[in-house]
Image: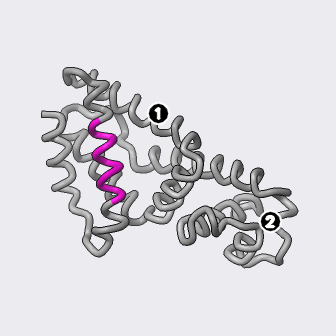
Amino acid sequence: MPDRRTQLLDAALTVVAAKGMKGLTHRGVDAAAKLTEGTTSNYYRNRAALVEAVLDRLEQLDAALLQDQGPAGPPQNIEELAGQLAALVTALAGQHAGLTRARMALSLDKPESVTAGHFRLVGGLEQALATLGIADAAARARDVADYGDGVLLHLLTVRRDEQPDAAAIAAAVRRLLG
């Protein structure tokens, strides 16, 4: 069982995913965590402290997700890289959709909060592309990251009733890198 702080922060992410940042209140988190009213405010005295803790928890969960979803080693070719990225996108739009929604809501409210994670992702992608000998790896990494962000947005909004197609996503990544 997670400790109380983790329980509260996971409940806060659930609230943000469902209701956006306007829904993130101490009472809302208490209710989502099924705890006595006032519990969240005992741990996080004001909303700013709560939001900062939620951002830290999101970063922890993102790091764990990348480690769990990530490959055992660097991709050996574009085909493998495209498959890895497609698997990550489908996981973020599927089993981790709530976390993705929360990340998007937080990024709209606090754009600077996701900047470091974005640059880590793009930097890792750029390094992988450079290792594979892809010309202009920095620009291509940005293009692939932008494509992934757009696909995620569409899978969570206008295409939410569709099953993500990992093969189609991988094919699009290959085209971007071709």
Q: Secondary structure at mark 1?
A: helix
From the viewer's perspective, tell me whether residue 10 is left or right of residue 163.
right
Report crowding for label 2: few under 14, some 14 to 19, many 20 or more residues within 10 A (C-alpha).
Answer: many
What secondary structure is the stretch in magenta mostly built from?
A: helix
Say above or below: 151 vs 127. Answer: below
Q: Secondary structure at mark 2?
A: helix
Give residue 39's quadrant in the image.
Answer: bottom right
Is 111 included in the stretch rendered in magenta?
Answer: no
Say above or below: 19 vs 173. Answer: below
Residue appearing at x 25%, y 39% in the figure: 81
From the viewer's perspective, tell me whether residue 37 is left or right of residue 9.
right
Say above or below: 151 vs 39. Answer: above
Residue type, mark 1 in image: Arg
- Nearer to me, 148 or 95: 148
According to the picture, the residue beneath numbered tag 1 turns out to be 120
Residue appearing at x 19%, y 33% in the figure: 77
Give the residues in magenta.
Answer: 143-153
Give residue 129's quadrant in the image.
Answer: top left
Dot 2 or dot 1, earlier in sequence: 2
Label at residue 166: none
Which quarter of the figure is the C terminus placed in?
top left
Label at residue 40: 2
Residue appearing at x 33%, y 53% in the figure: 89
- Nearer to me, 177 or 86: 177
Residue appearing at x 87%, y 62% in the figure: 42
Could you say where residue 173 lies in the image, as x and y percent from the top left?
20, 43
- Nearer to me, 162 or 22: 22
Residue type, mark 2 in image: Thr
Could you say where residue 46 lies in the image, as x and y percent from the top left?
82, 56
